[in-house]
Amino acid sequence: MQKLKNAVFALALATVATAANGAAVEHLTGFVDVDRQLALEASLTKSLSATELAAWSKHLSAHAHHAGSPYGKENVQFIAELFRSWGYNVEIEAFDILLPVPKERELILEGPSGYRATLIEDILEEDASSAERAEVLPPYNAFSKDGDVRGELVFVNYGIPEDYEMLERYGIDVTGKIVIAKYGKSWRGIKPKLAAEHGAIGAIIYSDPADDGYARGDVYPTGPFKNSSGVQRGSVMDMPLYPGDVLTPGEPAIKGTRRLEIAAAPTITKIPVLPISYRDAEPLLRALGGEVVPLPWRGALPITYHIGPGPARVKLKLVFDWQRITIENVIARLEGATYPDEWVIRGNHHDGWNHGASDPISGLVALLGEAKALATLAAEGKPPARTVIYAAWDAEEPGLIGSTEWVEKHRLELNSKAVTYLNTDGNGRGFVSIGGSHTLEGFFNEVLASVIDPQTKVSLAARRRAMLSVTGDEKQREELESRKDLRIAPLGSGSDYTPFLQHLGIASANFGFGGESAHGSYHTLYDTFEHYTRFRDPGFVYAVTLAELLGRTTLRLANAQVLPFRFTGLADSLKLYLTELEALAEKKREEAKRNNKLLENNAYGLALDAKKTLGAPKALPKVPFFNFAPLQNALAHVEDSATALDKALDAGDLGNVDLVVLNRRLYQSERALTSTAGLPGRNWYRHQIYAPGFYTGYGVKTLPRVREAIEAKLYDEVDHQIAVTAKVLAAFAVYLEETRALIP
Ligand SMILES: [Zn+2]
């Protein structure tokens, strides 16, 4: 480690007009020599080639390459060889994990009519990849338990909590029944979890054409949407509890680690669950009787949707091969010339469900392009100041397994050295989206201002602003005026940033383009090179833009003399979240009051139609007034210390500060937002600001302790959770003050 004594910095105020795009006046927080950095970025941009990205994509998505598959292993060697040829120090890090694959899948409508679900996706003449059968995994949900169940069918809409509340009003109980739910509105793993909690013995999930089939647009191969045979595969592991290998929670799945018995693994589903196409779902839904569904539950199949239960009766039989497989992450290092012990980590997974041209290869080829460009710079004598680590993760699809096991294995080293983690996954055409740590919000905005959108020729930031000013809600439009930076989204879960951010408190972000290439190929047999190049990103135009965006982001974080962490943006978002919580409590209070009053007056009873199908809702528990004061006070403290620290960092004169010490304080600041005790009932999740929802899955819950207590109507716990969260924020404020004290 090297101690630098740089007397005077003209850091944050350094600006330069860029000729490159003629538009933006660039502002590079943390750099002394802005011109040098911009020149590096310009040569990075110049060296990116759509033709090269397309060739890698074609190769990597030529065959099915799910975790443990032969072609997956070939891809690992191919990726490792590319990195080696560019001069990276490459390691293939293996883990032994549990991954069930289907041996038997059977779904039969046994009455009143008969139908055996085909459970296969059609081969299409127009898509040669769809003809591959040998290595292709059939449609299934990974980490469903085995089962052989028979029962009456019940339609549960999307199978989310409010749907079960509605069923209760209809007087319908799913105990002992098999539910059929639509994909959408929640992460898929929530559907069997809730079904089991309500007593169901099996679950079927299908994609309704209203959501990503013919009601949205032409279906594949005519258009990009789901055809009648397409099935979304995917994991149903209980990831909101912990992701990664189901048998080794919190520990790396390597030799010597104690493993749970399969029967004791808490993240395997409690009931069997199978995904099917709308072609297979239609006869089942047609056979349902009982009440007609409420209007918002209707899909786009040519039937009248009924809830059931019955008279449709189905048999669902699933047998899995519970195999232990070896998964392989490719880890490629480019040693930092000045700060080798500070790591900027950039990752994308390499395993797909099938061919995976979009998910994950479209993001992976961008990563490869960036890595090659950085290596070229290094070979020209311009290596990054910090170490850059590129990671191609295995087994993301079954449950973020490769990244989680790696993070658990290298926990201590990552805790001290990891500066940031930057993630991408499937990519498409359109508008940029960023979710991530708000400590880097200002920095990300700077990068967005310096990358040009290939279609409109304005900056990514300008295009996103234009989009929000047209399609954003009132709040978003108002913020475009009142706020300097575009607010980045908080992260829930759904890709490999989760272990970095939510387990270790490493500032992280997830990037992608989309919005102009809606499709139905996600996790189906049709996520192929053919589909991708026709509908998702013809010409690999946005793959190159993604590489430029992430290349610049990585290079800036790797080279900044002072890392561009800032804290007033975070304080502002925390304030927003607190306001949301107060509004949520108020809304619940009003709802309960109104609901209970209507019950008292028997308004529901009087309003019922002759059939009296819809019963009155339950009486709701009274919502007390919560004491938000500890959070308000802690937040005021955070605001003050954030303002003071940002001001000192922005002042430009850092005096004799030891940059190694200051930078470490800055990049470890996110750790101070975690607590080793974790979240209630799920101690793997340590971040106290961002978490995936316990009952939404991918969807984020900010200030999760408090928000989830209110949402779950655990009103007795709310004040306690407020106090615990306030303590974390108060300690964070002190951390910022101590950091401020380093600067004279
Ligand atoms: Zn993916």
Image: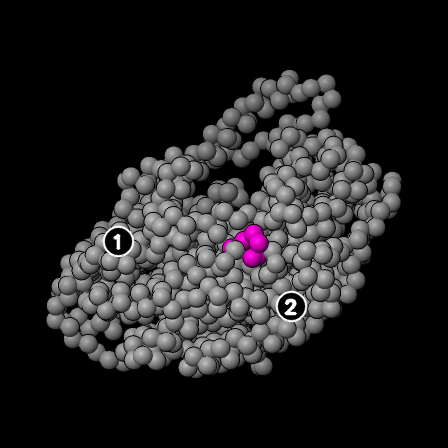
- Residue 69 image position (x, y, % from top left): 66, 72
Q: Quadrant of the N terminus?
A: bottom left
Q: Is residue 667 left or right of residue 711?
A: left
Q: Is residue 410 left or right of residue 607?
A: left
Q: Earlier in the sequence, mark 2 or mark 1?
A: 1
What residue is disc 2 on? 63
Magenta span dominant secondary structure: helix
The one nearer the camera, 165 or 308, is 308
Check disc 2 and report its element: helix, strand or loop: loop
- Residue 23 seen: yes
Q: Is residue 36 left or right of residue 547?
A: left
Q: CA distance from mark 2 to mark 1?
A: 43 Å
What residue is disc 1 on? 22
Q: Is residue 345 above or below residue 608?
A: below
x 53%, y 44%: residue = 712
* Picture quadrant where residue 450 is located: bottom left
Q: Quadrant of the C terminus?
A: bottom left
Magenta segment boundaries in residue numbering? 532-537
